[in-house]
Image (spheres, coloured by chain):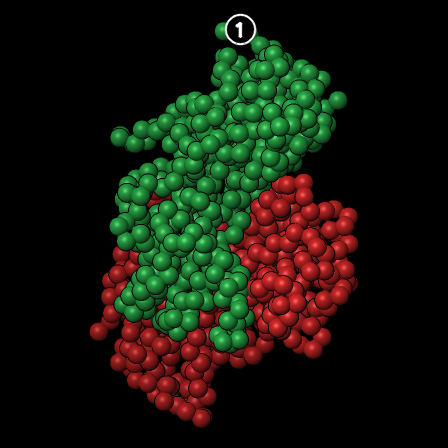
Chain colours: A red, B green
Amino acid sequence: MKELTGACIIGQSGGPTSVINASVLGAMEAALDSKNITRVLGAEHGIKGVLGDRLFDIGLEDRDELKLLRFTPSSALGSCRYKIADPDADDTDYKRILEIFKKYDVRYFFYNGGNDSMDTCNKISKYMQKAGYDCRIMGIPKTIDNDLYGTDHCPGYGSAAKYVATSCMEVYLDARVYDIGMITILEIMGRNAGWLAASAALASHKGLGPDLIYLPEVTFDMETFLADVKRIYDKNGKCIVAVSEGIKDKDGKYISEYGSSLAKHKDAFGHAQMGGLAATLANIVKENTGAKVRGIEFSLLQRCAAHCASKADYDESYMAGAAAVESAINGITDKMVGFECDRSDGYKCDVKLLPLDIVANTEKKVPREWINEAGNGIKQEFIDYALPLIAGETEMPKSDGLPRFANLKKILAK
Amino acid sequence: MKELTGACIIGQSGGPTSVINASVLGAMEAALDSKNITRVLGAEHGIKGVLGDRLFDIGLEDRDELKLLRFTPSSALGSCRYKIADPDADDTDYKRILEIFKKYDVRYFFYNGGNDSMDTCNKISKYMQKAGYDCRIMGIPKTIDNDLYGTDHCPGYGSAAKYVATSCMEVYLDARVYDIGMITILEIMGRNAGWLAASAALASHKGLGPDLIYLPEVTFDMETFLADVKRIYDKNGKCIVAVSEGIKDKDGKYISEYGSSLAKHKDAFGHAQMGGLAATLANIVKENTGAKVRGIEFSLLQRCAAHCASKADYDESYMAGAAAVESAINGITDKMVGFECDRSDGYKCDVKLLPLDIVANTEKKVPREWINEAGNGIKQEFIDYALPLIAGETEMPKSDGLPRFANLKKILAK
């Protein structure tokens, strides 16, 4: 293995998670402590910070303050949703990136994100190889959607799942307080994959969760759904439903879009239509059952509620960041860090490395066989899979009863 | 003091809180351990359980399981919103209550709720006195609204405030992740008093909270509001606003009701109108600024997120329940337990007793002088008041990374 010495850039991209900074901390600490990495730079707003020469000098940060990143949600360096061009079509960005890499003698690039970020990594890596610029490029995964290919699970998922399951249990108790009928619809994030909505089943597993769970992996049929809800409501006087925001009908139309078409019938229904899937479904269920219906959108708390993070998740996220740096120093490039887990005797999670190009272009869905036949519930296989990922509590430091988040100096590198 | 021996009934009423069961546990444990109380009964769904003779025999519960009530949100005995009649107009309910009290030799009645519940307590107490039935009746306060008169604060408020402040801090970080403009509107519970919305200022106090906070204590003016938001957004590219659900305009109309009138203009605006205050305001701000706007309703997680409860709150809630029982045994009746706090040197909270009739008919608002002159922010006086109430973390026991809530047998008394 050829020893490669130079600066590194660490960047974050895509939607944040509760533990995305734990990964960045893992990478920063490994880099700061490495003799091969001469300088640690943090890109402001991901690749846009590289293009704009907005790089924070992480070596100037206080190490104790930096450590608080482990418990601080939401991309501390700033994120972006910048789609890098195909280099064959337009190589302007790539030339600029190379220029910046040369300016700071950057020999290591670590990018913390989802599918698109792995695609960015992959393209930059290929370009640098073609340009003959020696640089090692590693992807560090993150996504509450848990939809990255080739890894047992994704950093960020466990904490979001823990928040969703915990909140479902609490809402379950709240929904049973009065002796009146009540239907509750919970909207959970996940546009294409139902992993996060499935985590509501962890609450049901404890006897305090939704009666029905609908994922985008199964075609959503409104009539069947209404019949499901009515059956449970008529029997118990209560019904709690969890839906993934990405559920679609047989024509591929998002159910969340039903709201706007329903709005046309507003006068007929006699009241204003609301937006959002939970509200849309709540309206439809109300019309069809006459029951009291409440729609709750867990909203972005799902991805930023670090106060309910899973210890397993932030420990593994840290491990993924550190492993990316250590692997690169050991000569690896063009890979994403993934997890390989063994649940046969307890739970064991190890790092594995995956080719960037495969990860970038594949999406992992909830296996159909983990969903019940009726398509309205989650099977034990998922519970066994997910429980270890939500294990353990956050050790978030507090001040005055509130989180003490990292407050970085963010001094721009010259 | 005359010694009074007999059974007790404990009931819960009104909207739940994260720590309402801590109060009930305090009362139950004091009652179970008292030689004067021969039997401890829990009313199912508050006074409705008394009327319907649905009383759980708490003595048959496992004491260790019962202890989990401290960390279990949402009225474990079940709640109700039953409005008891004026006894002069209709004494049917009162006769029935007396009948049940006689059936079980009930000499103590403890009712855990807000203003209306104190009114119920007061009416029952007066009736029993008139009927010559010896019975001691005590109110145990609870409300996330913090609007009960005569007490420094209310059990349940601290935990709701802690959840709101914590979530505001997390949302603040999330809202700053991208380098694009973003306005975020947070809707917080509180129909008539702004205590809970004010707790968002605890996040601002930490530098990670809303820029603007609007309470129902100040008349809401849409033009001024839009100017406030624009000013901050133009300067920072971001603006976070917290609004109490109960804000009203100068004509006394709830701003949340603007949604339905706006809906009439739907075609002109070209998109479907949404319900809820956050969504309504988000629409209006979008129209007026062109900015990306997100509306978030904290919804009922505010009142049931026991996973983010304050230790101060559940300790004090327990104390209030226990104090109600101990006071009654010592001859007190017709009172609500309240708190008297000293913040001059640290924080000290003691129990005091308040006349039921005064509590029942008065509502405590946020003092105008704790709100800034412009009516869009909260002053230091509130911070000093509220910080001790959110202090300390929950010691909620977990199983598989999820809350281990109390699971009572609820065996009906015969």
Q: Position of residue A207 (x, y in %)?
A: 68, 45
Query: Residue at the location (43% across, 67% down)?
Result: B284
Q: Nearer the viewer, residue A216 or A264?
A: A264
Q: Is residue B65 left or right of residue A7?
A: right
Report which quarter residue B108 is drawn in: top right
Q: Nearer the viewer, residue B368 or A307?
A: B368
Q: Which secondary structure lies at badge 1?
A: loop
Report which quarter residue A257 is drawn in: bottom right
Residue lying farthest to the top in this orientation:
B2
Question: Looking at the figure, which quarter contains the C terminus of chain B?
Answer: top right
Residue A76 visible in the snapshot: no
Above or below: residue B365 compared with residue A5: above
Q: Nearer the viewer, residue B336 or A310?
A: B336
Residue A236 visible in the snapshot: yes
Type of residue at label 1?
Lys
Q: Position of residue A271 (x, y in %)?
A: 60, 62
Q: Position of residue B346 (x, y in %)?
A: 29, 32
Residue lying farthest to the bottom in this orientation:
A89
The chain carrying label 1 is B
Query: Residue at the location (43% across, 33% down)?
Result: B362
Q: Residues within 10 Å of mark 1 (few under 14, many from 20)?
A: few
Q: Position of residue A332 (x, y in %)?
A: 45, 74
Residue lying farthest to the front in this orientation:
B89
Residue linked to disc 1 = B2
Query: Residue at the location (38% across, 79% down)?
Result: A135
Report which quarter residue A33 is drawn in: bottom left
Q: Is residue B338 left or right of residue A188?
A: left
Query: Residue at the location (28% across, 43% down)?
Result: B369
Above or below: residue B220 compared with residue B199: below
